[in-house]
């Protein structure tokens, strides 16, 4: 019995220890995955179609002189200039005007002239134009003439009825200027169809009660807004 136990013990000693056995070899799936990742790392990145087109256009605008016909096609067009010299009495024109809602209360003119029932808020710089009997107290300045600047060429125009147009009236209602500094309000532009009802011979204007009265250069046109729409935010 002792001999048998001794033989078993001897065999145990003769067996090689397994603690030093090599690690398992990677499976075929792992090997394929490793090779696929290596291929992806070696392949150069491919530009997407939109990015490639954008880079081509950018490179073209950088090397094409701005006076060439192709450059004129690529260059974005701005608004058409306001052709004041083409205005005629009784005629119409489409003009773009820059505004903030505070202009409803800020802009004013003074003159004794009236046109088609429309007039300035002031008869003189110290005398308000008397309100006509039967006129509503709040008609969004339907017949009050105010000075404006065109967008984006800054031409001076006098317009009546602008705030009474539905889109502009809604903007005024949605963004009331009371208690807000004018420079904190969003500036926007309107595109209006104007009918020209006269020209001032003598008029003074101011851009806010804090500004002094001034006189425009030349006899400015007066237009009545027949339709207006908000076109975009003005910068």
Image (cartoon, rainbow, N blue to C red):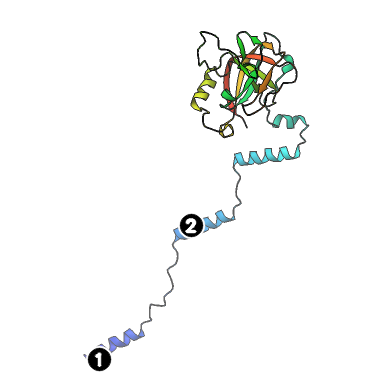
The x and y percentages for residue 150 are 66, 23
Measured along the vertical axis of the image, is residue 162 above or below residue 61?
Answer: above
Q: Residue at x 68, y 23 (%)?
A: 213
Mark 1 crowd level (few <14, some 14–19, many ≥20, 10 Å Cα): few
**Contact, mark 2 vs mark 1 (Cβ under 8 Å):** no
Kindly state the secondary structure of the residue where label 1 is placed.
helix
Q: Specify whether 162 is left or right of 3.
A: right
Which of the 4 quarters of the picture holds residue 5? Answer: bottom left
Residue 206 in picture, x, y percent from top left? 65, 24
Which residue does the image show at 73% across and 30% down from the upper left? 72
Q: Secondary structure at mark 2?
A: helix
Give the residue pinned by disc 1. Answer: 3
Position of residue 85 in the picture relative to residue 161 (left or right): right
Q: Position of residue 53 (x, y in %)?
A: 64, 38
Is residue 58 in view?
yes
Is residue 145 visible from the viewing direction of this image? no
Q: Report the label total.
A: 2
Q: State the residue position of label 2.
A: 33
Q: Where is residue 234 drawn, in percent x and y?
A: 61, 30
């Amino acid at each position: 019995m002792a001999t048998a136990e001794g033989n078993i013990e001897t065999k145990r000693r003769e067996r090689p220890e397994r603690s030093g056995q090599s690690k398992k070899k990677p499976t075929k799936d792992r090997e394929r995955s490793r090779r696929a990742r290596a291929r992806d790392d070696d392949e150069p990145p491919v530009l997407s179609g939109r990015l490639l087109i954008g880079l081509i256009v950018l490179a073209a605008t950088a090397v094409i002189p701005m006076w060439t016909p192709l450059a004129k096609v690529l260059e974005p067009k701005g608004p058409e200039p306001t052709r004041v010299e083409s205005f005629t009495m009784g005629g119409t024109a489409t003009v773009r005007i820059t505004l903030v809602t505070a202009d409803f209360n800020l802009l004013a003119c003074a003159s004794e002239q009236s046109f088609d029932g429309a007039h300035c808020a002031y008869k003189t710089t110290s005398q308000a134009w008397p309100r006509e009997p039967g006129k509503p107290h709040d008609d969004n300045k339907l017949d009050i003439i105010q000075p404006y600047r065109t967008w984006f060429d800054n031409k001076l125009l006098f317009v009546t009825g602008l705030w009474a147009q539905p889109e502009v009236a809604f903007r005024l209602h949605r963004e009331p200027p009371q208690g807000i500094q004018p420079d904190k309000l969003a500036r926007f532009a309107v595109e209006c169809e104007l009918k020209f009802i006269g020209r001032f011979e003598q008029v003074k204007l101011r851009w806010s009660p804090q500004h002094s009265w001034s006189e425009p250069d030349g006899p400015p046109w007066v237009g009545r807004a027949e339709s207006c729409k908000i076109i975009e935010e003005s910068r």
